[in-house]
Image: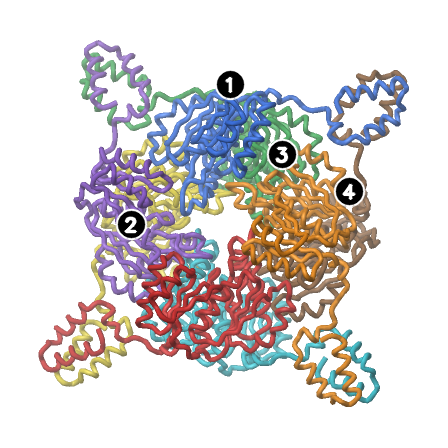
Chain colours: A blue, B brown, C orange, D green, E cyan, F red, G yellow, H purple
Amino acid sequence: MTPDRLRKIFDQVRRGKLLPDEGVELLRHLPFEDLDFAKVDHHRALRVGMPEVILGQGKTPAQVAEIFARLARHSRNVLATRAGREQFAAVKKKVRGAKYRPLARAITLQRDAETYGKGTIAVVSAGTSDGPVAEEAVVTAELMGNKVEHFYDVGVAGIHRLLVHRRALARARVVIVCAGMEGALPSVVGGMIGVPVIAVPTSVGYGASFNGLAALLGMMNSCASNVSVVNIDNGFGAAYVATLINRV
Amino acid sequence: MTPDRLRKIFDQVRRGKLLPDEGVELLRHLPFEDLDFAKVDHHRALRVGMPEVILGQGKTPAQVAEIFARLARHSRNVLATRAGREQFAAVKKKVRGAKYRPLARAITLQRDAETYGKGTIAVVSAGTSDGPVAEEAVVTAELMGNKVEHFYDVGVAGIHRLLVHRRALARARVVIVCAGMEGALPSVVGGMIGVPVIAVPTSVGYGASFNGLAALLGMMNSCASNVSVVNIDNGFGAAYVATLINRV
Amino acid sequence: MTPDRLRKIFDQVRRGKLLPDEGVELLRHLPFEDLDFAKVDHHRALRVGMPEVILGQGKTPAQVAEIFARLARHSRNVLATRAGREQFAAVKKKVRGAKYRPLARAITLQRDAETYGKGTIAVVSAGTSDGPVAEEAVVTAELMGNKVEHFYDVGVAGIHRLLVHRRALARARVVIVCAGMEGALPSVVGGMIGVPVIAVPTSVGYGASFNGLAALLGMMNSCASNVSVVNIDNGFGAAYVATLINRV
Amino acid sequence: MTPDRLRKIFDQVRRGKLLPDEGVELLRHLPFEDLDFAKVDHHRALRVGMPEVILGQGKTPAQVAEIFARLARHSRNVLATRAGREQFAAVKKKVRGAKYRPLARAITLQRDAETYGKGTIAVVSAGTSDGPVAEEAVVTAELMGNKVEHFYDVGVAGIHRLLVHRRALARARVVIVCAGMEGALPSVVGGMIGVPVIAVPTSVGYGASFNGLAALLGMMNSCASNVSVVNIDNGFGAAYVATLINRV
Amino acid sequence: MTPDRLRKIFDQVRRGKLLPDEGVELLRHLPFEDLDFAKVDHHRALRVGMPEVILGQGKTPAQVAEIFARLARHSRNVLATRAGREQFAAVKKKVRGAKYRPLARAITLQRDAETYGKGTIAVVSAGTSDGPVAEEAVVTAELMGNKVEHFYDVGVAGIHRLLVHRRALARARVVIVCAGMEGALPSVVGGMIGVPVIAVPTSVGYGASFNGLAALLGMMNSCASNVSVVNIDNGFGAAYVATLINRV
Amino acid sequence: MTPDRLRKIFDQVRRGKLLPDEGVELLRHLPFEDLDFAKVDHHRALRVGMPEVILGQGKTPAQVAEIFARLARHSRNVLATRAGREQFAAVKKKVRGAKYRPLARAITLQRDAETYGKGTIAVVSAGTSDGPVAEEAVVTAELMGNKVEHFYDVGVAGIHRLLVHRRALARARVVIVCAGMEGALPSVVGGMIGVPVIAVPTSVGYGASFNGLAALLGMMNSCASNVSVVNIDNGFGAAYVATLINRV
Amino acid sequence: MTPDRLRKIFDQVRRGKLLPDEGVELLRHLPFEDLDFAKVDHHRALRVGMPEVILGQGKTPAQVAEIFARLARHSRNVLATRAGREQFAAVKKKVRGAKYRPLARAITLQRDAETYGKGTIAVVSAGTSDGPVAEEAVVTAELMGNKVEHFYDVGVAGIHRLLVHRRALARARVVIVCAGMEGALPSVVGGMIGVPVIAVPTSVGYGASFNGLAALLGMMNSCASNVSVVNIDNGFGAAYVATLINRV
Amino acid sequence: MTPDRLRKIFDQVRRGKLLPDEGVELLRHLPFEDLDFAKVDHHRALRVGMPEVILGQGKTPAQVAEIFARLARHSRNVLATRAGREQFAAVKKKVRGAKYRPLARAITLQRDAETYGKGTIAVVSAGTSDGPVAEEAVVTAELMGNKVEHFYDVGVAGIHRLLVHRRALARARVVIVCAGMEGALPSVVGGMIGVPVIAVPTSVGYGASFNGLAALLGMMNSCASNVSVVNIDNGFGAAYVATLINRV
């Protein structure tokens, strides 16, 4: 029920074509969502330029291509995460301008390349193997209209490599930190800067890393108070949260 | 916003005291719940005679007494679970007719003693120590207007004690089974009867029982298909589910 | 030992062909189950029209086909769950009328299509990936003689999609809710309606979902009291419990 | 080593009072931190008005009082979290103006009451028992110079109570959500609004809640992408992250 | 229904006082256990001299005393495990001859001191702190009529202390091994001898021992094939199993 | 050092060819095991007829065949567990008389078929899927010279199928019970008989069975005191322990 | 059996007072440990000056005092860990020179104050709450004859505080690092230096620290290769290992 | 910034070519690492002869070959761990002198074969399946310039096989112990010798070994105080720590 529709009812009541009780009855039997015309739009600004997103994992190339093409009709930017080359091949045939970012395992369509974020998002990762998760965050953040700077291979066991980037990190408006194994990097980065840190535990490691559980627990217990945590390997989610912070 | 309130708006529109656009605006700015006059009442029958409930645990005697008294003003039956004698002493001073069921650790006020359930709820427990959880289920179910039959101390290691009650169990409309340690009883009971079994793992046990985790996992993996499970020691929840089944 | 057999013994004793002690001795040496003629049949009604069931997982196509065919000789309805297309191909050659439901991964034979359930079973699922588990529940419930209504893709992060179906859900006699990830849907649904909710955690998710453990724990701790839980991905079990509730 | 100190060395070298090699040697033997005069101050604005913080838990009243008094000499605002009444009694004797917030279990000294945050922080909690954690977040956020709005007792099993506050929530710049048991609330709130959600699992619950583990896992797996998570019961940390977001 | 009772029915049928159909009907309506006259007694020998047992933990002194006294009326030997001095004080007043074994925390009444076991049960424990569990096994085994030999403080980090007892261990018919911490002792003992080893993990340890879980897992994975395991701290259960083995 | 070797030293000392100090020195420098001639042989009887055993898992067919052949030179009976058909094919070429037991996945060579066990070992399994583990126990026990009786498919949800075998079970000298899922069967069997029960949790199940962990925990917490437990899927270990019990 | 005793046997054989066979027989029947005169003493140097140690936890003051006094008779240095003031009071009455170190909760008797370690042991701890564990390591290492340097409150969230001590740390021969919460400190320290790091997870933290499990897992997964780990809160064990390294 | 570079600045200041303030400014804007000329070299000796290391796992043959070749240009010894034959084939084409150690799954290039370790490193492993992890430790230790002695197949269930090597073990300067299943070997070895023991849990086992978790927990709880632990299957890390100890 749009406000228009509602106004018509009131008009009819006014003009005596509808009794007040009939108006009540009409409203009573409308499905819930039609009543809900009072949609909030305070946060619309926060959503402009956000891409539509597909999770590629577990879908066939044909399925990904079909959904991607459908979304591309209505949305300027589209992102498929956790997608392989075969899925990209299928998408490319249907959607002109789609690109593949192999390290991030992401298919992107970026027709709106405007910058909506107010500052820079820094993405930091501990080791080479954490790269794909960090890159998923980078690609996502870029497609959401942020300036992104990345700092790779700056694990805590070589603290000087991280310290070199101190100033650059300090310029960011929000920092994403991806780390597997002991997951210690967010604490160190968090202690060095004064902005929010989004920590992403990765499933990198073996043995007692238990597929990222050790890193996740480490990050939950971070002694730096500016750290909050998303799911294991969830580079996308971290970029999404960071984007919202970068737009407020 | 009650229908009455809505009707008045329509009346005012009709009598020209309110313009249609003003009517739209009025509705637009009403908080959500006021619009929601179209409450469903299909299940009202299922709720008649349900007591108001307080979780005694973690509340002072004074707090329990105050809440209990307040609820007793509007509701005919009131139940406080996980409540001690001191809490009851405080309630008794404020609410005439309140009773204490020590094994169940429950304070009850039952002014509506009608039977709403269509059949009998059977409550089965494995060992003496499972008694309090089973008794919480019994008291809850009774207060909710069910006929309840209980079968205590019929653990799986003495299967004959359980078999004795086969016929009685078979007469129930729904069965609650409380067991700690290995949590095997729901599977055996479930295999003997053809009605839903609500399994309640209890924290009874030591060592590798891990406060009810072993029983919970056992019940989740029950080889009897008519078993579903509620939280550890949640006798109240089991009785609540059973009551709903007994009323449908 | 049927009552007939027992009566003959009494007859022989009566006619002097058997001494009382010989009668005692005869009974003493009969195996247990023969003594057990006193079978309860209170719940027979609850079992009429229930299909025979095969777990397809871990069985070869030949094995599934053989068991399916054997069961189809004595039973009107047969269901094989967690079965692939190859298993269905093998069944189809042996059993006329067998059908395959690919999303549910189920092979069905339905020669008795009567409705035994008294009301409707609603099946709700959170996301697309929870589909197969929900569909297993749907197919199972249908084959067991229930009217089934399904509501897909109504996850808690888009609560309005769920609210739209409030009235429809409120008409159901029992509701099955399938959800992976955080497993929050049963709580929300449970709070909206007054009938029993059977919650099915699914293994959908990654990272800290730990193959459904996060959803399972979430559902065990549901703040809605009308929720009980079955094993991870156990769509069949949920439908079985719901069917029993729908028949009582 | 301040720039001043360094300038003096260069001066002495210039004036020939120090040989270049001696200058090198002086720098070589200075401890690390003295070299580090190039401190970054980009984020100074983010730290103005932040209180000094003490963790009261595990400290004697005397210890808390002594630390509190020392911090109060140099800092305008001081906060002691997880502190009891006895600890407050000790503080009150030493520090004029210290207040106690019993529900939050916090001792506060607020001499700088300016508002530094740009928008409002909303704090939402699921049940009464989650109150202390939510209140710790509220008190912390207030002391850090934020406008704070709280919404208590809006658990997912009564979704309408939450929906009532939809507009108010939508006005917040960042939302903190505290929930125990199944930890589902952040997903629902996250789906309703377009700003970052900081989720705080609480140890509220029993049995399979495993002291907040169930809630933590649920929140890590949230299907709403704007959710990130802090440690169990860490109301302070959530407020700290929210404050940083509210200031960027 | 005893055979006598059954014989009477046949007699009545024979003498025409009861029709065959009436006999059938009589049997049909007898409760299950009455039909079950065909009790097996093959293992009676294994049970002669077994004491009645009470778990003292969680019972008041009065409760323990009352149960103990009741059992003492019908049974020659009675054992209360996990019982404290206060419980013993209460028992002593009611039951003459009751003794207290403080290390084992057991109250015993032994009026039948005959030896029923065919060989010796050896009880081995790793450290001083494992003593109470080992002693519970010793007391239980003695009261069940076994010769028991104990070997204390022979942990694996001082392997020579264990090797000293090799011959003595080799004479046992079954060996109980109690160990906390890493739970390695059963493997070493198991490798030295050719009889069954009953392993008892104890909750001795701290940190990563997780109340006996580390020891339990260690023992489950024993590389010695003659090891089987009972619950954490379950000295009683180990002695029970060992007694059965010693009697076969 | 054999006794012979030692005697020669004494002879030499006696005949003056060796000084006492030289004798001391000789012993001092002998490696440990040579000193250890004092081997215990009390348990030799328990070991006669025990096969040599190979774990097939993780070994190539060639490796299995080579080890099998080597063992077959010195030992009358040889057993390879967890072995596939390819491994058997390789063994068969090298060792005449080797047989394959497909369900048990075992390769056997049995040239000594004497019965060493004093009674019967009963092997009970809950469901069809537990078959391979149970069969591994059966084959192992047979090869170790025991009479074995097996009872398959007698899960707790169909308790009557188990009760039928009550007498047969009661005749066994030791009982092995294999069960996955909730692992409840050992408790029920344990309560029915008076001999030791060796429980084998199997990895049968899905979801919350966590590869046998649920069954393992269930069995550790068995309310039947005559139950002890071996590792998940360890049919071999259970048969080994049972064999030792059957020989004492 | 000392070499002396063995020499006598040879003497007797030589002098014909003992037949060779009798000599063999004598040896055969000696208990194991008597044969084992060939004790290794290669590592004696590593053990000189090591104190005798008592675990105070779980012992009464009287017990601690008695053991302490007994050990003090034969050993120059004695250490009681995890001991309280009451235990110390009891010790002090019996043993002159015993001292109490309250932060470490250790009772010490140090009559041999020689330095046996070749270099310095550095003990680093992350936060104030890790102090007692670190101090236990310090006291233990000192009593074992090491020079010890400690660096407190140098957690990873304030990395500059740690960097200040870089040179001092680099001078140590082995470093002990104690940290709770996320347990990240050993990785950072390990990356800064080239000597072995002994990591001690502490139970400091709350919520998802799970009593030190998070720290333990973090340390097991350290990306610095020179880190090895001891049990949670095991300051003593870390000092013991470090002492051995410092003496080799 | 090398000291040379710094000296030049001072020279320029001295010669008036640079103002003191310009000197300050120059230092202020240098990146962190350039300031850090004061590198510690106390531990240089500990690092001489250490190979460069590549983790082969998860890298393509081409990637491994390329990195290996690059490292071989600057480093005398190179080690690739967890590398397969295909990866070796690729390396061999590019790097002359590269060798493959199949059991260790390691590719080695050893152009510096000098011995840097002061004593011997002993590597002990429990069972055949632990071989690869132990061999990784052996190869790593050898390439790092240590004399290595290995003792395979000396599990705790055959304690005599271990005791045979007691003297040889006692000669080592540090001992690495690899064990899966119950992980008991480090405790036994630790108790026999007086030098540091590095324990490596292996993922060998099945069922309740949980991929090495049981062994890890066992080793963390070792009752021998000279044991510290590295990650599951981390033979490389153990050898690295042992090498550092062998060089101090």
* Of labels 2 and 4, the one closer to you: 2
C-alpha span from label 2 to label 4: 67 Å
Residue B199 seen in the figure: no
Question: Which residue is under mark 2?
Answer: H102
Q: Marks 2 and 1: which is nearer the front?
A: 2
CA distance for labels 2 and 1: 52 Å
Kind of residue at badge 1: Ala
Disc 2, disc 3: CB below 8 Å?
no
Residue G221 location (% of width, % of height): 39, 43
Residue E195 drawn at (x, y percent): 41, 73
Disc 2 vs disc 1: Cβ atoms closer than 8 Å?
A: no
Q: Residues within 10 Å of mark 2 (few under 14, many from 20)?
A: some
The CA distance from mark 3 to mark 4 is 24 Å
Residue under the point 46% across and 37% down: A201
Distance Cα–Cα, label 3 vs label 1: 28 Å
Position of C82 relative to F122 (above/below) = above
Q: Is residue B237 left or right of residue D31?
A: right
